[in-house]
Amino acid sequence: MAAAIALRSDFTGPDLRRLARRTQDAKQARRLLALATIYDGGSRGDAARIGDVGLQIIRDWVLRFNAEGPDGLVDRKAPGPEPRLDEEHRTALAAVIESGPISAIHGVVRWRLTDLCQWLWEEFRVHIARQTLSRELRSLGYRKLTARPRHHAQAEGAIEHFKKSSLPSWQRPRRRRGSSLPR
């Protein structure tokens, strides 16, 4: 069996307990208390019982504590998967959107997310979902806008003819003569 990894010597058990009392992060406090047990001469098994974890996790905490100190015991955000599009793809995508589709070449008269996904596949062999592409386009500053459909035979000014006009809400109605309302 391998020897246990020693804890750094610039802290003591009471130091870690004091840090655990001050922290707002419950998980960090639990980890600090488990390591304080080791500083006080307890076994790694005792620390694992206090931290409610296994021995391997205690070993990981010791490594993180030795490398980064008490701040190393705070949970971090997981990095997540690598993005599908890099800067080259994003600039090319922005250029294609700005120039607009050419119906003879691209076969469409306006870009849809499906069309842009297909273009990315044909151009760069990058497969990306429509929802992911929508998020990427939003991060580039684009919004999903479509023109309002209009009938081809609509007469100019036909809409204005049917609109109703009413008094603006800030104008008071005119008073009638002989009204008994006090001023």
Image (cartoon, helix red, strand yellow):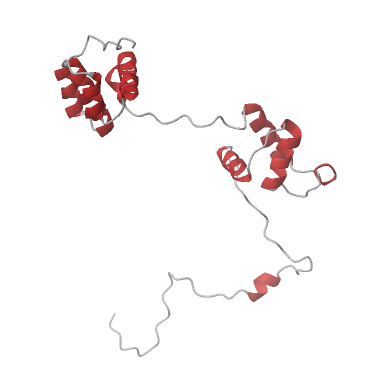
- In this view, the residue farthest toward the front is 1
Quadrant of residue 155 within the rendered picture: bottom right
- Determine the residue positioned at 16% across, 23% down: 17
155 or 16, which is in the foreground? 16
- In this view, the residue farthest toward the left is 14
* Residue 142 relative to residue 169: left or right: right
Quadrant of residue 140 within the rendered picture: top right
131 over 156 or under it: above or below: above
- Determine the residue positioned at 77% across, 50% down: 109
- In this view, the residue farthest toward the right is 104
140 or 122, which is in the foreground? 122
58 over 135 or under it: above or below: above
User: In which quadrant will I find the N terminus?
Assistant: top left
* Residue 113 relative to residue 152: left or right: left
Q: Position of residue 7 (x, y in %)?
A: 26, 12
In this rendering, the count of numbered labels is 0
Q: Position of residue 81 (x, y in %)?
A: 53, 31
Q: Position of residue 57 (x, y in %)?
A: 33, 24
Quadrant of residue 24 within the rendered picture: top left
